[in-house]
């Protein structure tokens, strides 16, 4: 009996370490110089990079994409990385994205079956680029999963936006600290 408890405790500890160490994103283009905080910016196009043979019903609709854009705008504004937002042609910086993986998931299935079945998943490549030069300043692949039956799949969009803004802010602070 004692050996079973030790084995169970060990397995739980390994599981927690494995889950805690998993990055939810991978930076593909790190920020090389600090951003101009007075630059104007906007949220640009979020494209569907999902397989063309995927059923349109299984893809995110325009409403979800608009929510993602709003979450991105909120998270970036919250961190005060830029001074102005807008859609004028003089915008210098733009955040764009390409959806690489998407599963709506089902809270009911998550509750009834569990084991990852019914999870909502979103993987998106997000980038901040200079519209004038076309240069990508910062980019990464951001992934989120909702496995709790009490949460909606919409949480994936909110968490991805938060991860993007946090990663950008972290790199900006690191560069400003080094200056």
Image: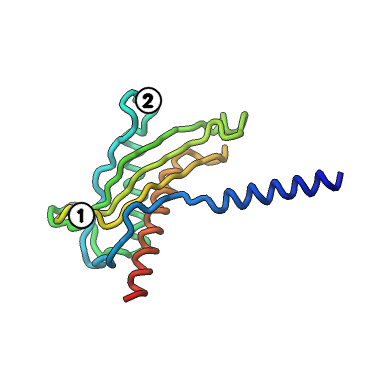
Tell whether 116 sits left or right of 79. Answer: right
23 to 66, vertically: above or below = below
User: Residue 8: x, y in percent?
Assistant: 75, 45
Of the two numbered discs 1 and 2 on the same chain, state the one appearing first in sequence.
2
The extreme right residue here reads 1
Mark 2, Cα crowd under 10 Å, few <14 / some 14-19 / many 20+, is few
The extreme bottom residue here reads 179
User: Residue 29: x, y in percent?
Assistant: 31, 55
- Residue 175 falls in which quadrant of the image? bottom left
Counting labels gives 2
Task: Find residue 170 and name its label.
Answer: none
User: Residue 61: x, y in percent?
Assistant: 34, 33
- Residue 154 falls in which quadrant of the image? top left
Judged from the image, the secondary structure of the residue bearing numbered disc 2 is: helix
150, 114: nearer the viewer: 114
Task: Find residue 57 and name its label.
Answer: 2
Colour pattern of the rendering: rainbow
**Quadrant in which the N terminus appears:** top right
Proximity of marks 1 and 2: CB atoms separated by less than 8 Å: no
At 32% from the left and 46% from the top, the residue drawn is 69
Tell whether 10 sits left or right of 140. Answer: right
- Residue 179 falls in which quadrant of the image? bottom left
Residue on which the image places disc 1 = 135
Mark 1 vs mark 2: in front: 1
At 34% from the left and 29% from the top, the residue drawn is 51
150, 137: nearer the viewer: 137
At 34% from the left and 32% from the top, the residue drawn is 50
């Amino acid at each position: 009996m004692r050996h079973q408890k030790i084995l169970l405790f060990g397995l739980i500890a390994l599981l927690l370490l494995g889950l805690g160490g998993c990055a939810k994103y991978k930076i593909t283009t790190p920020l090389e110089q600090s951003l101009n905080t007075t630059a104007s910016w906007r949220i640009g196009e979020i494209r569907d990079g999902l397989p063309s043979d995927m059923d349109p019903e299984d893809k995110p609709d325009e409403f979800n994409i608009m929510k993602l854009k709003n979450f991105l705008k909120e998270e970036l504004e919250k961190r005060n990385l830029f001074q102005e937002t807008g859609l004028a042609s003089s915008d210098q910086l733009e955040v764009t994205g390409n959806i690489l993986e998407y599963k709506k998931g089902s809270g009911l299935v998550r509750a009834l079956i569990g084991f990852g079945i019914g999870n909502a998943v979103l993987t998106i490549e997000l980038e901040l680029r200079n519209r004038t030069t076309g240069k990508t300043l910062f980019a990464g692949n951001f992934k989120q999963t909702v496995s709790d039956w009490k949460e909606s799949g919409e949480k994936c969009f909110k968490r991805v936006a938060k991860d993007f803004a946090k990663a950008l802010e972290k790199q900006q602070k690191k560069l400003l600290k080094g200056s």
